[in-house]
Amino acid sequence: MTIPTPIEALTVAKAVVATRYADAAFAFAAGSIMRGDGTYLSDIDLVVIHDRLETARRESFTADGFPIEAFVHDPETLAWFVDADVARGRPSILNMIAEGKIIGDADRARALQRDMARRLADGPPPLAPGERDALRYDITDAIDDLRGERRPGEILAIGATLYPRLVELSLRGRGRWNGAGKWAPRLLAAVDADLAVRYEHAFRILFVSGKCEDVIALAEREMQPHGGPLFDGDCRPAPSSWRIRPRSEP
């Protein structure tokens, strides 16, 4: 099937904003199609900014054959989601705005783009000790599971769970933004091309042949600057408010 061009995608995005979001102040059309590296199944990411909404929302639909994911906000709801993205170190909506094609009020949209570009350049907050240790614990637990005798299906499941946690430690531990799915190998390569190759090699062997040694070695190497594996001594108290009074017995 034919891959749509960025111009074709932007034309559809403008029509959607004009009809479905006619009272919006401005919008940003983003995603792989807009960057020119999409596939025939790629969707258009659309960030739509109204002056005032009761609630933000995310909605998915199809327009002229294009799958569209719309993130609909006003300035206050957008600020909440941007802060949440920054806090978790995964700047999804910041990237969409910073790289998006502007639809509507260009002056306000460019000002917002500049702010998002500045926050992206500032990088994520440092990985907090509790976050770091939670990652170390989860990674340690996974590689200890891989050291045992496991069925092939179990190895696949453990590897699938381990990969995003290990990527998060590798990226956030280096002061870089985290990403999920297809973004994980891209971000690893941007940080260190050799590291990305080691990831691909180790996990390919794990998923294809079930051999765990390279993944275990990779995980141990990535944990080493952060204190190494963690099990003994780990303690994470729950907040005191996490309690519900039991119902009285009849």
Image (cartoon, helix red, strand yellow):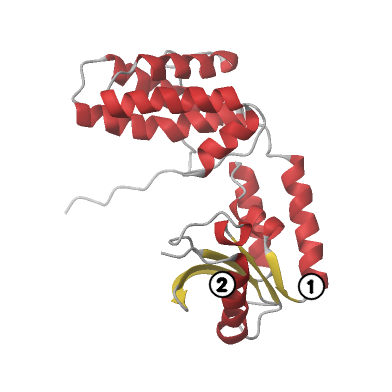
Q: Earlier in the sequence, mark 2 or mark 1?
A: 2
Residue 243 seen anywhere in this rendered image of the structure: yes
Q: How many marks?
A: 2
Position of residue 138 relative to residue 85, above or below, is above
Q: Amino acid at mark 1?
A: Ala
Q: Is residue 118 left or right of residue 154?
A: right
Which residue corresponds to the image point at 54% horizontal and 13% vertical from the top-left?
224
Residue 149: where, in percent of width, then height? Answer: 20, 16
Q: Residue 208 lies in what quarter of the image?
A: top left
Position of residue 13 relative to residue 101, above or below, is below
Question: Given the current orientation, which residue lies at the most extreme front position?
Answer: 2
Q: Is residue 30 left or right of residue 136?
A: right
Other residues around mark 1 within 10 Å, as few (<14) / some (14–19) / many (≥20): some
Residue 73: where, in percent of width, then height? Answer: 62, 70
Q: Secondary structure at mark 1?
A: helix
Position of residue 237 relative to residue 69, above or below, is above
Which residue corresponds to the image point at 41% horizontal and 64% vertical from the top-left?
1
Q: Amino acid at mark 2?
A: Thr
Which residue corresponds to the image point at 66% horizontal and 52% vertical from the top-left?
83
Q: Is residue 185 left or right of residue 204?
A: right
Q: Are marks 2 and 1 in contact (CB under 8 Å)?
A: no
Q: What residue would you read off at disc 1?
A: 106
Q: Is residue 6 left or right of residue 40?
A: right
Which of 167/72 is in front? 167
Distance from label 2 to label 1 (Cα)? 24 Å
Which residue corresponds to the image point at 44% horizontal and 75% vertical from the top-left?
65
Residue 236 seen anywhere in this rendered image of the structure: no
Q: Secondary structure at mark 2?
A: loop
Position of residue 143 relative to residue 240, above or below, is above
Q: Residue 160 lies in what quarter of the image?
A: top left
Q: What residue would you read off at disc 2?
A: 55
